[in-house]
Amino acid sequence: MTTKAMERGFKLILGSQSMARKRILAEMGYDYTIVTADIDEKAIRTEKPEDLVVALAEAKANEIISKLGGESQFAKDPQPTLLITADTVYFHEIPEQVIDGLIDDAITYKVAGGLTLEHPLISPFIDSVVGGVDTVMGLPKELTEKFINDVLL
């Protein structure tokens, strides 16, 4: 599938090794290049969690931009970048034994935020998802497509 972005020579950089994000972009039909930020996340600290996520995102973005600036193909043709992410998952009360089961399951430590909506232990306790399941997985398809097309038009 050729998308408008690809037809117009848009270069898509995925700043993540997330299998879910790779799968979502592939499902959308995008070709992309992976450029990850090799930063020490534990060295970045703030008092408020909401400030920490912004500080980490900025540090990662700066590292990736630095890497891209060093590669002639991107330095000659810099592309504007936009990152927007938002999701909320509401849960019913989760019994302690379910939480213990999640802690004991190794997959919990291998996914972003320790949350896999389709996990058989957690899925019965999900009340609602605001922002879409693909958003929770790390990349909202509809919003991603909209923003890419907005930038190109």
Image: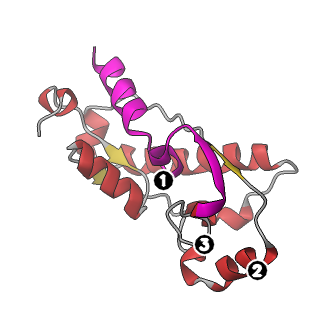
- In the image, is 83 to the left or to the right of 40? left
At label 1, which amino acid type do we have? Met
CA separation, marks 3 and 1?
17 Å
At label 2, which amino acid type do we have? Gln
* Vertical order, 28 against 40 (above or below): above
Q: Residue at x 49, y 63 (%)?
A: 118
CA separation, marks 1 and 2?
25 Å
At label 3, which amino acid type do we have? Leu
Which of disc 1 and disc 3 is earlier in sequence?
3
SS state under label 2: helix
Q: Residue furthest right?
A: 47
Q: Give the residues in magenta.
A: 124-153
SS state under label 1: loop
- Expressed as whole percent of the image width and height from the top left, the position of residue 43 reads 73, 64
- Expressed as whole percent of the image width and height from the top left, the position of residue 85 reads 55, 38
Q: Is residue 34 visible?
A: no
Q: Residue furthest top?
A: 153
Q: What colour scheme does the image use?
A: secondary structure
Whether the magenta-drawn stretch holds residue 133 is answered as yes
Q: Residues within 10 Å of mark 2 (few under 14, many from 20)?
A: few
**Quadrant assignment, res 117:** bottom right
Disc 3 target residue: 121
* Mark sitting on residue 97: 2
Q: Residue at x 49, y 58 (%)?
A: 37
Q: Nearer the viewer, residue 111 or 11?
A: 111
In the image, which is nearer the foreground, mark 3 or mark 1?
3
* Mark sitting on residue 137: 1
- In the image, is 149 to the left or to the right of 20? left
CA separation, marks 2 and 3?
10 Å
Q: Residue at x 45, y 49 (%)?
A: 64
Name the image quarter holding the N terminus: top left
* Vertical order, 4 against 15 (above or below): above
